[in-house]
Amino acid sequence: MRLSRYISLIIIFIILTLNEAVCSVSRDISSYLSNANTEYKKGKYEKAIKWFEKALEIVKDEELKTKILFNLGDCYYALKNEIAAFDLYKEALKYPNSKKYLISHPETYIHLANIYFNRAEYKKAAEIYLEIAKRFRNKKLAPYCLVKAADSFLNLKKYKEALRLYSKVVLLYKDSDEYWISKFRMADIGLSHPNLEIPKSIEYKSYFDPVSAYKEINEEAPENLKKLKELARLRIAVFYTKRKRYAKALSITYFFIKNHPLSPFKDYAKSLLKEEFRAYLEELYKNRNYSRICRLYDALKNLIPLSELDQKAIDIIADAKYRIGLYKEALRLYLLNPKEHIYEIASIYNLLGRYKDTIDFLMPLRDSISADIFSVLAEALYKERRYKDLVNLLKDRNISNIEIYYLVAESYYELNDLKNAFYYYSIVAKKKSPYQLNAVLSLANILFEQKRYKDALSYYKVAQKLCKKCDDSDFINLQIAECYYFLGDSQRFEATLKKIKKDNLLKFVSNTRMQLIKLENQYRKLKWLIE
């Protein structure tokens, strides 16, 4: 009997001890959670994490463990550690009461959706956003979740589904910030995918008229959406760029950069400006509007330095400056990529009278340059009176450029090698070119100097046909007259001299020549009478 009573007392003692232990654990969990929640509300998330973890170590109840895991995830989410938060949320989701908790704690549910969104798991994110929006239609969460769900579909390239959700926000939540965000997103889709089959109802207006939507956002959206307003302004420029109205787009972007130097979108604006600038350059170049290209570059060069332009844009600017005669500026640009602009660089050296620079630049390349570039080198050698170098350079080389033939002929003439000069002048004289007339005249002059007046006369007459009303017409007539004179045809001599009409030195010479002829004739008559 005593033994039975003794055992009963022991059992009662054990039960009381266990109960006290359970109560003690319960008090500890309650205390830990209280401290954790207090720290969380203060925004001291790291301290809250420590208290939640202490509670998690001793808690046995699944429902409470689920809650603590979600709370820990919220702490890490607040600390922007989404990896840790996601791991905790996944652990909590293993328990059967997790969905019930999330529905009753929509902010945690949104955190989970946001993590799915940021991990590019848009389908899962959209499902959660839509579920929250459905359960909290009249609360602030609904428009936010609808926009995020629409953004998820947008990233999945499901544009119609995205537009449907944005239009719902536009229709139902006009007093929310998401109203303006939705209009902006719809306008963006209208800009990038303008031909979708969408109902032409009022809530889709932003899709069909993006520019009006952007302007409305820029002018009427609340000031707390300043970034959205600025971005809308830049999107207007994008719209005009897509419509190839580059001048309009450039104007908008340029003034945005000037008026918003501290904007978070300044880099985006600058990239837009460069894109618009390049596109406009190509259009102007295609239309041969070289002056406009130069003015445009001069206006924007402080915002878009050469180091930020691609080679094609630099080449267009250089070529435009070259074509309107800004040779020094063009040369500076061409020298940035000299291997691709050998002809242009050498040509500018010649145009600036820097023939030595042309020779120094091209002589090392003489065995590999094209005929056009060779003609530039030939001109430089000729201008520097390096006639021997010129003719030696062209020996045993196939020549196809008529200008080079002419310069070779001129060089041989200067070297008094009339045989070779005559040969090359003859080649030039047979082909229509800017040098044909000079070549024919040179041939006539050589023959005239050799007193081959009949042959010279035939060339002067060819020159006369080529010249007609050119500046050398009087000279040609004078030389023709001289040929007639030396051939003894005084009648044609006088008739040709009368064709010289301009009041200049040649007229004076022709008049003097006629007077001399008259004197010679009188002398002959007097001489005959005397004899």
Image (spheres, rainbow, N blue to C red):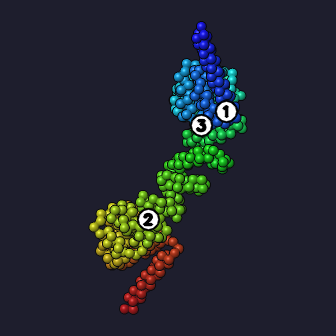
Q: Which residue is mark 1?
A: 40
- C-beta proximity under 8 Å, tags 1 and 3: no
> Viewer-proximal residue, 483 or 388?
388
Quarter of the image where one finds residue 463: bottom left
Instruction: Identify the element where label 2 is drawn.
Output: helix
Q: Residues within 10 Å of mark 3 (few under 14, many from 20)?
A: few
Q: Which residue is mark 3?
A: 80
Q: Is residue 320 left or right of residue 465?
A: right
Q: Tag 3: residue type?
A: Lys
Of tags 2 and 1, the one toward the viewer is 1
Q: CA gap, disc 2 to disc 3? A: 61 Å
Q: Earlier in the sequence, mark 1 or mark 3?
A: 1
> Viewer-proximal residue, 2 or 202?
2
Q: Which residue is mark 2?
A: 346
Residue sticking out furthest to the top: 1
Residue at 62% across / 20% down in the picture?
Answer: 17
Q: Tag 2: residue type?
A: Ala
Image position, residue 46 (x, y; %): 63, 37
Q: Tag 1: residue type?
A: Tyr
Q: CA gap, disc 1 to disc 3? A: 14 Å
Quarter of the image where one finds residue 370: bottom left
Image position, residue 398 (x, y; %): 30, 63
Q: Quadrant of the C terminus?
A: bottom left
Q: Residues within 10 Å of mark 1 (few under 14, many from 20)?
A: many
Q: Residues within 10 Å of mark 2 (few under 14, many from 20)?
A: many
Q: Quadrant of the N terminus?
A: top right
Q: CA gap, disc 2 to disc 1? A: 75 Å
> Viewer-proximal residue, 505 or 494?
505
